[in-house]
Image (cartoon, helix red, strand yellow):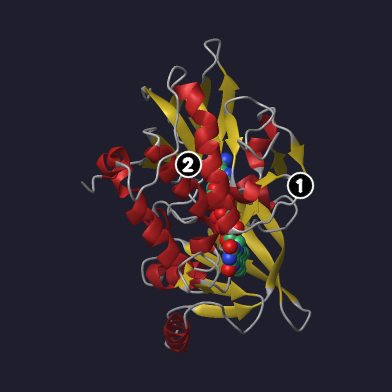
Amino acid sequence: VNSVIETDAVIVGAGPVGLFQVFELGLLEIKAHVIDSLPVVGGQCVELYPDKPIYDIPAVPVCTGQELTDNLLKQIEPFEPTFHLNQEVTLVARREDNRFDLETSAGTRFITKTIFIAAGVGSFQPRTIKVDGIDQFDNTQLFYRVKDPVQFHGKNLVICGGGDSALDWALDLVGKAESVVLLHRREEFRAAPASVAKMKALCEAYEMQFLVGQVTGHEAKDGKLSEIKVTGPDGVTRRLPLDTLLVFFGLSPKLGPIAEWGLDIERKQLRVVDTEKFETNVPGIFAVGDINTYPGKKKLILSGFHEAALAAFGAAPYIFPDKKIHMQYTTTSPKLHKILGVE
Ligand code: FAD
């Protein structure tokens, strides 16, 4: 059993707004734990457009999604946030002492005074394959991520998808698996051209196979997935025997468990009661960034940064009930210089 982490603030989501929330809380001397379902920080900026330029971050004429994330990480360094990645927040419940119990899918448990939901468009989950009944083989013969590649050695594998994950795993497992078939719905790939070239060379050397088509059915024998049916561009459906199916259709965001925490939800977004504190209908839970909605809301990084600043001031009385909180300038405040470690 994991021990419980007692803290003042938990931030759900490590996108740009969750990261900047660490900074704004830090200036008020509030330490934060940050949770994200993805294995990396940066949210949409890193998951959807790491190399694309952003032009509307104030005073940064241009930076990529990855650069913005790296700079935010550098900016929050003095506050030493603790990251808990690869885990989704599954439970939030009010305690009798007015704090919150919060738990993740990895079994990490917190008791916290405040929660900042910076969950963007929701937690990114693998897109599933749409074939009736095939989900009964989830995690036994059908996989959407690879945790332990060794379990696929010696197996007859079919790998679906045309992006980097599909290509990278096909190239990794070829020669270790008994056989590898890459299946993609068309001839064109989203993956790096070098990986595609490597894959084609391996096919020419009969080390693996590439098929164009889609999975349209399956067959089971003795309760085990024995073959899939693949419909090609010619409209013909062929049978393909296999031991294991790996599917990499990309990630799509799901609001998921957030819908069950008693928060006011309007069209998959959390309604905040005012734009003074960005607090939700549940006192002590704040919503910042793309996840929130209020009159005039714009889903921009810049708006999320502003919301994070006001939410931090809004939350401070829960953490320091007896302290008067003053706004200070980072330029001139000796106290903030100390906090930032720039004395
Ligand atoms: P997100 O970036 O969505 O991050 C939320 C994080 O929360 C995710 O990492 C998710 O995994 C995590 N999460 C969700 N639920 C849970 C849970 N239950 N448990 C654990 N973790 C969870 N904005 C601009 O201002 N300028 C631009 O030029 C611009 N260009 C864009 C281009 C593209 C292609 C896209 C898609 C968006 C663009 N945006 C731009 C929008 C911008 O990316 C978003 O406004 C911003 O990412 C919102 O940040 P966020 O931190 O609120 O949420």
In the image shown, does 62 or 222 lie closer to the viewer?
A: 62
Ligand 1 neighbours mark 2 (CB distance < 8 Å):
yes
Regarding mark 1 in the picture, which secondary structure is present there?
Answer: loop
Q: Relative to 297, does residue 278 appear above or below in the rendering? A: above
Q: CA distance from mark 2 to mark 1?
A: 32 Å
Q: Relative to 315, does residue 199 appear above or below in the rendering? A: below
Would you say residue 151 is visible in this rendering? yes
Residue 24 location, quadrant: top left
In the image shown, does 116 or 49 lie closer to the viewer?
A: 116
Where is residue 265 shown, x and y percent of the image? 74, 38
Where is residue 169 shown, x and y percent of the image? 44, 67
Give the mark toward the camera: 2 or 1.
1
Q: Relative to 211, does residue 103 appear above or below in the rendering? A: above
Residue located at (45% from left, 31% from top): 9
Task: Give the amino acid type for the residue marked by disc 1 in the picture.
Answer: Pro
Q: Residue furthest front?
A: 332
In the image shown, does 78 or 139 lie closer to the viewer?
A: 78
In the image shown, does 129 or 269 lie closer to the viewer?
A: 269
User: Mark 1 or mark 2, which is nearer the start of the sequence?
Assistant: 2
How crowded pointer 2 is (Cα within 10 Å; few <14, some 14-19, many 20+) is rated as: some
Residue tagged 1:
295
Direction from residue 153 to residue 46 in the image, left or right:
right
Residue located at (51% from left, 74% from top): 52
Regarding mark 2 in the picture, which secondary structure is present there?
Answer: loop
Task: Give the amino acid type for the residue marked by disc 2 in the picture.
Answer: Gln
Residue tagged 2:
87
Residue 340 location, quadrant: top left
> Is the N terminus in the top left, top right, bottom left or bottom right quadrant?
top left
